[in-house]
Structures are given as C-alpha cells and as structure tokens.
C-alpha cells in the first residue's frame, strides 16, 4: 500500500510538471527544466553518502571499535540478506540514526553516540533494521527522483514569476500577469508538499520493512517513543536539507519549515507497528 501511495504521489508530481511546463514554456520548457534539475540532483545521489557523513563528522567504526553496534548491524544484515554496510558513529548526544548510499552495495548506516546510550539491544536492532529498510527499498533513489521532479517544477515556477515583467507583449492583459504570479508562487509550495508526502510514505514503509527484518515491531515502537522524547530534550544540530534522512525528525522547533514535515507523526508510526505485532509480522 505504501508503494502504491508513493507511485500515486509521483504521478501527481509528474502531472504538475507537465501542466506547469506547458503553461509556461511548452515542451521545450519542460525538457530544459527537467534536465537542469536532473544534473543538479545527480551529484547529490552519487555522492550522498560522502556528503552527509562529512557534514555530521561521522567516523567509521569496525568491530573492535564498537562490538555492540557492529554485531547489531551484522545481525540485521543477516536477517535482511543485504550486503554489510559501512558503519559510522556521529559525535552527538542527540539520539538519532540514518542510512545513506546510492544502492545496497554502497550503503552506510550511521548512529549517534546518544542513541547507543539510550536504547537497549532489541530497540537498537529495530532502529538498524529500519535503516536497512531504507537501503532495501532504495529510498535514496526514490528521494532523488522526487527531488528532481520537484526541482524542475520550482525552476519553471521561478521563470513564471519573471516572464510577465520580461515580456514586451501588452496584449495579454493583467489576467496573464496574475496567473503567472500565482503559478510562480504556488507551484513550488505544492511540489514541496507532495515531495514531503513521498518522504512520509517511505518512512512508513521502512518501519514495516524493519518489522519484517527483526520480527520485533514493538521494540522499534519503544525505540521511536524514546527517540522522539529525547531528541526534543537534546536537539541535533542539523541541516534542514538532510533532516528527512533521520529516523526521527531532528527539527524540533515549531517554525514555518516544520509545516513541511518529512516524517509521519510518531503516534501513527507506533500504532502501525503495534498492528504489525498483532498481525504476527
């Protein structure tokens, strides 16, 4: 069901791109905007692991550095039948975790120092299984495609805001000016909302995949509750552009950006995990 919802949201994004592109620049406008967005996001997809790990000063660890963490990752890997990812620790007391990498063969799993102190072994296994769920479900690729389409819409909308002022044709009238301005302002907002909705669906899917891998959905539910509470007490210094990668939203302040949440409500995630337990997943 989560994959179906993601596909439907991609259809909405694509239709928005086609409609707005033809409205503003015809076929040529759509093509140029999409190519430009693709180039901008290709580097992010290919080098995402190096970029985000460096951003959070993550250090790679081996088994002798942190046997508990390494063995937990190994256990989850064996149950998921994925290749062993690189394992990193982020020097932060704020409890959180993320996975990155363009495919399962080039994946990395990172946890903060805070999460290792907060969670017990079963809860940590649930978190690692969630991150491996993102790897198995190719969510870095999914996120990059969504960002590419949303980015193309944003570039077309940017052109739309300026076209009425650059045009020398006075026969269009004031109505065209208003339409262009509305498209230029509202289209990027709509695209961002759909992109965030895709991110939320991938979080739900990663939770389900974690339940299937670990067979301990209640452990992940308990971990999410702890992480949600503790991350608010000890916020993580983060770049909003990478906030969607973490298992719980590190952006705790109630500002305008929080309206575009990349994470579903913790209560809903816990409720679903409890349902998976009752279903024997």
Image (cartoon, grey):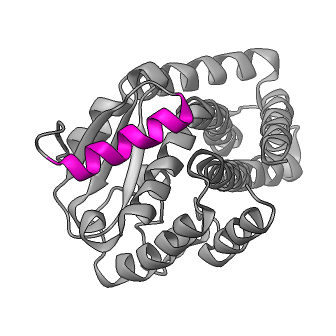
Out of 85 and 95, give the one closest to the viewer.
85
Q: Look at the picture and state if 21 lies above or below 127.
A: above
Report the number of numbered marks. Answer: 0
Where residue 107 sits in the image (x, y, percent)? 40, 29
Where residue 36 sits in the image (x, y, percent)? 55, 21
Secondary structure mostly seen in magenta is helix
Out of 59 and 240, give the one closest to the viewer.
59
Left/right of residue 231 with respect to residue 190 in the rendered view: left
Residue at x-position 74% and y-position 62%: 276
Residue at x-position 60% and y-position 69%: 218
Taking the magenta stretch, the answer to whether it contains residue 242 is no
Residue at x-position 87% and y-position 40%: 172
Out of 256 and 81, give the one closest to the viewer.
81
Left/right of residue 54 with respect to residue 49 in the rendered view: left
Residue at x-position 25% and y-position 52%: 68
Q: Look at the picture and state if 11 lies above or below 265.
A: above
Q: Quadrant of residue 34?
A: top right
- The residue range painted magenta reads 66-81
Taking the magenta stretch, the answer to whether it contains residue 80 is yes
Asked if residue 191 shows in the view, the reply is: yes
Asked if residue 252 shows in the view, the reply is: no
Where residue 261 sits in the image (x, y, percent)? 59, 65
Q: Residue furthest left?
A: 65
Q: Look at the picture and state if 106 lies above or below 279.
A: above
Could you tell me which quadrant the C terminus lies in? bottom right
Where residue 216 sits in the image (x, y, percent)? 58, 60
Left/right of residue 220 with respect to residue 98 in the rendered view: right
Left/right of residue 264 with respect to residue 256 in the rendered view: right
């Amino acid at each position: 069901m989560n994959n179906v919802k993601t596909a439907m949201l991609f259809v909405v994004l694509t239709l928005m791109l086609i409609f707005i592109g033809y409205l503003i620049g015809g076929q040529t406008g759509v093509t140029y905007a999409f190519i430009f967005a693709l180039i901008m996001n290709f580097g992010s997809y290919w080098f995402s692991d190096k970029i985000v790990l460096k951003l959070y000063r993550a250090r790679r660890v081996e088994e002798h550095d942190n046997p508990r963490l390494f063995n937990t990752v190994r256990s989850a890997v064996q149950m998921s039948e994925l290749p062993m990812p690189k394992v990193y620790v982020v020097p932060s007391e704020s409890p959180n975790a993320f996975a990155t990498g363009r495919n399962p063969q080039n994946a990395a799993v990172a946890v903060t120092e805070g999460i290792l102190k907060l969670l017990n072994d079963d809860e940590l296994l649930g978190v690692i299984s969630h991150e491996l769920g993102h790897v198995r479900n190719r969510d870095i690729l999914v996120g990059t495609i969504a960002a590419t389409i949303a980015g193309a819409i944003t570039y077309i909308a940017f052109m739309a805001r300026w076209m009425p002022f650059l045009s020398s044709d006075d026969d269009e009238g004031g109505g065209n000016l208003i339409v262009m301005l509305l498209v230029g302002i509202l289209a990027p907002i709509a695209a961002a909302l759909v992109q965030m909705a895709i991110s939320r669906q991938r979080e739900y899917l990663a939770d389900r995949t974690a339940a299937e891998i670990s067979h301990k959905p209640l452990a992940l539910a308990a971990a999410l509750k702890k992480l949600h509470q503790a991350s608010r007490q000890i916020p993580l210094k983060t770049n909003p552009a990478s906030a969607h990668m973490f298992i719980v939203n590190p952006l705790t302040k109630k500002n305008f950006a929080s309206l575009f949440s990349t994470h579903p409500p913790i209560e809903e995630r816990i409720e679903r995990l409890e349902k998976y337990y009752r279903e024997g997943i």
